[in-house]
Image (cartoon, rainbow, N blue to C red):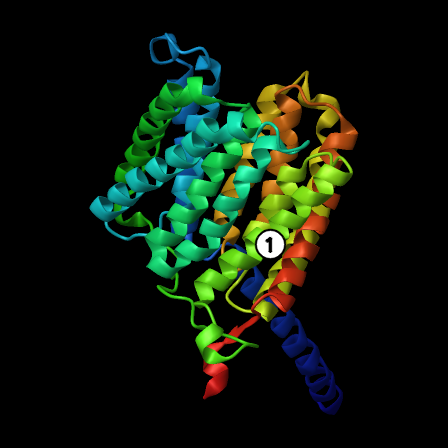
Amino acid sequence: MGREHRNASDRRPAARLAHRHLARFVARIEHVDPGAHRRIKGLRLVTAYGIAAALGSLPAVAHGFSSGSAIAMLAAGFALWASVSEARMARFESSRDLAVLCLAAALGAASLAALAPAMSGFGRAGPEWILLSGAFLAGFCRKYGVLGTGVGSQFYIGQLLAFGAGLGPADLGAIAVAGAVAAVACIVPRLLSGPAERPAAVPQRIEALVDGPAAWLRPSPEFAMGLQAASAALVVLLLNSACHLTESAWAITACVYVVAGSAAGTIDRVRRRIAGTLAGVPLGLMFLPVAGDYPLLVWAAASLAMIVYAMALPERYDIACAAFAFTLVVTLAATGEHSVALLASRTWETILGGALGAAAAKWIFPLRPARAET
């Protein structure tokens, strides 16, 4: 009896240790997959993208536009990122916000298309300089709550998509059609998902204070965030003018989306974004040999990755960035881009943009949490 009692006593610490490790593992899974509602949103992102791409490709929709082939790409991008930014509980409010977000993306694309000829003489970057306005608005518009945050982001996304497609003034009609198609494509899945979704809580205002100058010289936190993103993006453009970067728009995008409500928060997002990109890009490159022969497999993997992206946001930004980096690489490969150098440049462009974003957050009107005052 004594020996059995001692053996049972010896097993108890081991059992408690195993239970503790199991509990930690389950908690980590919960951070990535907090519930069915987040998986439903991920499915909605993929559905909105697919509907927009399909509708935009219809001959009846693209007929009469010189850039008709760009409608599907623009509409799919507008719908996807509008669905990401939308964060309401009720169907009516969600539908309203989705329509506004698609309009914001169309306006961003139209701004770049309309101004592109005027900027063509500004060095190698040319129309890319227009992205500075979107970079600033992506930070500044957080002043206006959940919808304002999405509007600023969508305006930049619209500019980015128009820049990538090389659009000009003649394409304004196609942009308007793409915005309308995107609104339909993302509102319909939201109406069908109904009350099953519970968006992650998003703060209405940035609770932060600007360090450094006298109180009367301090801008609002949101203005400081916009200035930080735009300043970091400006450095990228100057570097691109001096020495040609492979995909400078990727570095600018990293500058825009790493800026957070405090300098410490920005540095944390930079670390997570870089870590996620370092994981996602190599995984995407592994699909490169089969991208041409098995496009269905590649698109299925990309769809699954976007579901993981929606599940991981916002708690696990690193996993979300890995999922999106993977999606970007495999979709580019599926559409015919097989240059390993270009696809791999996503990694170092992200490192460059993240480092510049962190530097801007530290040196340009640095922010600290307001609760630190108490």
SS type, badge 1 = helix
Q: What residue do we see at 26% from left, 41% from top?
A: 95
Q: What residue lies at 49% left-to-right and 35% top-to-bottom?
A: 159
Q: Residue at x 35, y 41 (%)?
A: 101
Residue 300: x %, y % from top left: 55, 29
Label 1: which residue?
231
In this rendering, the answer to whether 8 lies above or below 271 is below
Q: Is residue 84 left or right of residue 181?
A: right
Q: Nearer the viewer, residue 140 or 260?
A: 140
Left or right: 174 with respect to 93? right
Three-letter amino acid code of the residue under disc 1: Ser
- In the rendered image, residue 170, in percent from the top left (x then y), is placed at 43, 17
- Crowd band around label 1 with a 10 angstrom C-alpha radius: few (<14), some (14–19), many (20+): many
| Residue 124 versus residue 15 in the image, above or below | above
Describe residue 335's horizontal placement relative to residue 152 as left or right.
right
Image quarter of the C terminus: bottom left
Q: Nearer the viewer, residue 118 or 175?
A: 118
Q: Nearer the viewer, residue 186 or 345?
A: 345
Total of numbered circles in the picture?
A: 1
Viewer-side residue, 196 vs 17 = 196
Q: Quadrant of the N terminus?
A: bottom right
Q: Quadrant for residue 346, please give it.
A: top right
In the orientation shown, which residue stands out farthest toward the left? 92
From the top left corner, tell me how far across and down residue 96 is, in percent. 25, 43
Please identify the quarter of the rendering in which residue 27 is found: bottom right
Answer above or below: position of 303 versus 311.
above
Residue 198 seen in this snapshot: no
